[in-house]
Amino acid sequence: MLNALALGVVLAANPAPATPASAQAPAAPAATPAPAPKPTAQATLKDSSGKVIANARFTQGPRGVLLSLDVVDAPPGAHAFHVHEKGVCDGKDGFKSAGGHFNPTNKKHGFLASEGRHCGDMPNVEIPASGKVQTEFFLEDLTLNPGVATSLFDGDGSALVLHVKGDDYRSDPTGEAGGRMACGVVEPVKEP
């Protein structure tokens, strides 16, 4: 009886006859990677003077929304970043027009709150000295599909707000995030 090592030696010593090229099956075409899903919503965050601070893109996934944020000009440091409940960004009122944090499930604010968190709560954005950063967030509690309580496209829309200070992740209702530095209305991407 041959053991596994001996069998390997026997097979190596007696290789299978080569198949003529004409009898070989044609090679399968190389698989092309699936194209990246196109963003289905976007927001341009501007300060009260109208200067662009950041751009955001939203892509609906099977279990939530991927938000890609590209900050182009913001002061360095930690800045709270939230989805707000109204799709209005009026700089004349300090962006209070965007309402409170998006909270259709009526929870308390903050990742560290025992009765929290708002659907619109996200981690702080850490901005380096350059004032530029790119980051992503996965928002498992949200959807872009209309007609759902947690949709960013509910009756009055929604907005993204970048705050002056960092979020402490526990103080209700705002995380002691300070004023609203920039705001952008979440809008569907228009297909060409």
Image (cartoon, helix red, strand yellow):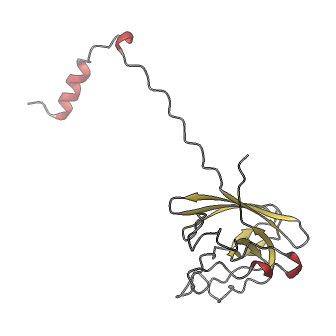
In the image, is 17 to the left or to the right of 131? left
Tell me the residue at 80%/73% (across/down): 89
Tally the numbered discs.
Answer: 0
157, above or below 61, in the image: below
**Quarter of the image where one finds residue 171:** bottom right
- Residue at the left extreme of this rendering: 1
Q: Please state the horizontal and vertical placement of residue 178, each as a whole percent of the image.
A: 77, 84
Front in this rendered view, residue 138 or 165: 138
Specify whether 18 is left or right of 99: left
Residue drawn 14% across the image and 34% down it: 3
Between 68 and 19, the residue placed more toward the observer is 68
Position of 32 with respect to 161 (left or right) is left
| Residue at position x 62%, y 85% in the image | 109
Position in image of residue 6 (x %, y %): 18, 29
Identify whether 83 is placed above or below 60: below
Which quadrant of the view contains residue 47? bottom right
Q: On the rendered image, what quadrant is the N terminus found in?
A: top left
Question: Is 15 located above or below residue 103 in the figure?
Answer: above
Q: Position of residue 61 (x, y in %)?
A: 55, 58
* Residue 180 placement (x, y as % from top left): 79, 78
Residue at point 64%, 69% (across, down): 152
